[in-house]
Amino acid sequence: MKQILPKLTNSFNESKIIIDYYNMIKKIILVDMDGVLVKEPTKEHEEEKRRKMARKGRKETDPNPDEHPIHWSEIPDIFLDLEPIEGAIEAFIKLSYHYDLYIVSTAPWNNPSAWTDKQRWVDKHLPIAAKKLILTHHKNMIIGDYLIDDRFVNGVDKFLGKHIHFGQSPFENWYDVLDYFDRKTL
Ligand SMILES: [Mg+2]
């Protein structure tokens, strides 16, 4: 990625003014978690968590859970152990030099542990994004120039900036996304 940061001077005050100015004019990229930064659980991981849930006697809200098992995202304590998607961490850090990045994710309403697990996941895998995590069911309410998201739900379809549809051509993976932003900074 081409270096577009300003040349710093020897004066601390001048440098600080320049850095503050560039931070001010950086475009904003919002990044989804599940399916973009975070991998879905493996089948084994999901089954283990389901067994744990059953042992603790946690009831599913569905009256016929055998016919309609809850989605993996509603299994308690499942988010913290999920692995990052290939290239995601490196790409997030690289893009942070040139853009102002925030994580915008939806935590399932019926899974309270997901809300804290998502914050703990950021601390564990992406501490550069500490305090830049926004959890919402209304992503269209968040201001940004770009939103990198693998789906259209939770307000993505009404987002006012550009939706980078992760997982679909031409943004099939993080290398494609970096190529796209590379071209923008040339
Ligand atoms: Mg997603």
Image (cartoon, helix red, strand yellow):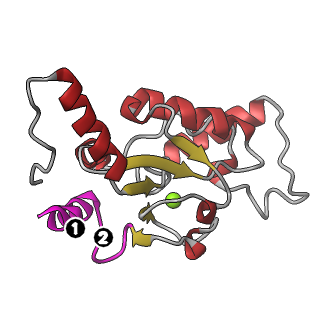
The residue under the point 51% across, 33% down is: 131
In this rendered view, identify the residue nearer to me: 157 or 8: 8
- Residue carrying label 2: 171
Determine which quarter of the picture holds residue 142.
Answer: bottom right
Q: Dot 2 surroundings within 10 Å: few (below 14), some, or many (20 or more)?
A: some
The residue under the point 24% across, 43% down is: 97
Quarter of the C terminus within the rendering: bottom left
- Residue carrying label 1: 180
Ligand 1 near label 2 (Cβ, under 8 Å)? no
In this rendered view, identify the residue nearer to me: 152 or 5: 5
Relative side of 152 to 177, left or right:
right
Given the image, on which type of amino acid does mark 2 rest? Phe
Figure check: 39 above or below 14: below
In this rendered view, identify the residue nearer to me: 17 or 57: 17
- Mark earlier in primary sequence (1, 2): 2
Residue 149 in the image, given as x and y percentages of width and height? 46, 63
Q: Dot 1 surroundings within 10 Å: few (below 14), some, or many (20 or more)?
A: some
The stretch of residues the image draws in magenta is 166-186
Figure check: 130 above or below 27: above
Residues at circles 1 and 2 in contact by the CB criterion of under 8 Å? yes
Q: Is residue 79 magenta?
A: no
Q: Circle 1 sits in a helix, a strand or a loop, which is it? A: helix
Figure check: 13 above or below 98: above
